[in-house]
Image: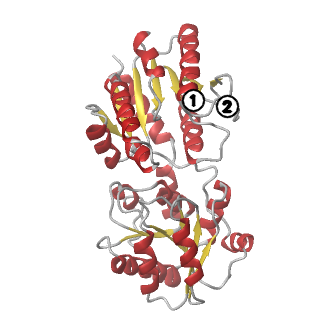
């Protein structure tokens, strides 16, 4: 099958979006005749790359440059199906697909309209984006989302009626188990203190308020919290660091490269995921590194729970409260203290289920069913 993958994501960036596009392309390439059109010079193997000219940043001008590149590629290779990663300014590329009769599918990786509002965009601009993106998704053969929460957003905000939940994968080449002692030495953290790891973008949705209260409530006598990430709640974290004590040490490392984010997971005894709406990617990365974790019951949690037979590999808080999160953290810390790291067989099964290959196979099956 000849597949055209189009994205506004800058592939040279050290970002989750860039890693997502590259990992998906790498998983699709051995299974189809793939062409990737996206900005950036990142190295890819086994697929055709088309880089739009001019070096525009994501937005309307890049969208027009992508559309021009798509026209040329369709005339050159006649792809059987196209897969478009939706951005706030997506419109022209989808219009080309419709005009040239190329069946296309749309990937939605975030609540795009909600994100525009959170970024302070004026209501009139959000309404324009809503109308434009609704046209894009209604013209698609189907919309692909990574979680039930995004399915609801696609249906309610973008009026999509053909939505499929196909979970994202983890890049197992870069997210892997490592030596805890070496990782701790890299960051200069205490080798004897048990550490809870939190790797996340500090968005307003992250329940740091509940986590900070839960951290104070822990029954574990002495414990540290290692935070990697930056964002709108950075000032909250800075105050938390200033108020922390020797028995409840909080260390904030700020924004780091993805490689160092993985090192922080490796340095931790256990990890925590304080999202209370859906299963964030970092929860899957914690699993790929082999760390026990505490989290809330959210959309998609069944995928994480299904990775293990060990009941204390993932401990779900009984409610979305600080008391319940403290209990869950005490359980995973206790299991780690008493039984150590997860067994190798558990980790092997989890990693095998987390790769991008499963998503690639499910996408191609969807393309085959729905393109005509």
Q: Residue 345: x, y in percent?
A: 51, 63
Whether residue 97 is situated above or below residue 223 in the rendered picture: above
Left or right of residue 196: residue 307: left
Q: Residue at coordinates 46% horizontally, 41% vertically from top-left?
A: 358
Compared with 44, 225 (above or below) is below
* Residue to which mark 2 is pinned: 45
Label ID, residue 29? 1
Q: Marks 1 and 2: CB-CB under 8 Å? A: yes
- Residue 311 figure quarter: bottom left
Q: Name the secondary structure under disc 2.
A: loop
Who is closer to the viewer here, 95 or 23?
Answer: 95
Q: Circle 1 — which element?
A: helix
Q: Where in the figure is residue 257, as x and y percent of width and height?
A: 67, 55
Question: Reading the chain from its start, which is encountered first: label 1 or label 2?
Answer: 1
The answer to whether residue 303 of the structure is visible from this angle is yes
How packed mark 2 is, by other alpha carbons closer than 10 Å (few <14, some 14-19, many 20 or more), is: few
Q: Residue at x 47, y 60 (%)?
A: 283
Q: Is residue 342 visible?
A: no
Q: Residue at x 69, y 35 (%)?
A: 42
Residue 144 location, x and y as percent?
A: 38, 36
């Amino acid at each position: 099958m000849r597949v055209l993958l189009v994205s506004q994501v800058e592939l040279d960036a050290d970002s989750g979006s860039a890693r997502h596009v590259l990992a998906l392309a790498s998983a699709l390439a051995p299974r189809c005749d793939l062409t990737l059109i996206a900005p950036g010079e990142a190295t890819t193997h086994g697929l055709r790359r088309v880089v739009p000219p001019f070096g525009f940043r994501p937005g309307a001008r890049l969208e027009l440059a992508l559309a021009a590149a798509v026209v040329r590629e369709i005339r050159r290779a006649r792809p059987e199906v196209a897969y478009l990663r939706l951005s706030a300014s997506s419109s022209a590329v989808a219009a080309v697909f419709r005009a040239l009769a190329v069946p296309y599918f749309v990937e939605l990786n975030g609540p795009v309209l909600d994100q525009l509002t959170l970024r302070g965009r004026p209501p009139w601009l959000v309404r324009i984006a809503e109308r434009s993106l609704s046209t894009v998704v209604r013209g698609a053969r189907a919309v692909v989302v990574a979680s039930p929460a995004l399915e609801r957003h696609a249906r309610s905000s973008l009026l999509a009626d053909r939505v499929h939940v196909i979970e994202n994968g983890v890049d197992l080449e870069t997210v892997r188990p490592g030596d805890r002692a070496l990782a701790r030495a890299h960051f200069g953290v205490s080798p004897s203190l048990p550490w809870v790891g939190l790797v996340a973008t500090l968005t307003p949705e992250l329940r740091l308020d509940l986590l900070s209260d839960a951290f104070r409530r822990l029954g574990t006598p002495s414990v540290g919290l290692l935070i990697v990430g930056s964002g709108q709640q950075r000032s909250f974290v800075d105050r938390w660091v200033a108020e922390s004590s020797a028995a409840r040490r909080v260390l904030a490392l700020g924004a780091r490269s993805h490689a160092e984010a993985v090192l922080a997971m490796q340095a931790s005894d256990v990890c925590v995921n304080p999202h209370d709406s859906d299963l964030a990617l970092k929860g899957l990365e914690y699993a790929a590194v082999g760390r026990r974790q505490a989290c809330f019951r959210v959309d998609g949690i069944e995928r994480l729970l299904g990775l293990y037979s060990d009941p204390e590999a993932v401990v779900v808080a009984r409610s979305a409260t600080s008391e319940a999160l403290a209990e869950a953290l005490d359980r995973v810390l206790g299991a780690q203290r008493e039984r150590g790291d997860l067994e190798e067989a558990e980790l092997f099964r989890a990693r095998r289920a987390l790769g991008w290959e499963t998503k690639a196979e499910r996408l191609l099956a969807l393309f085959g069913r729905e393109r005509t």
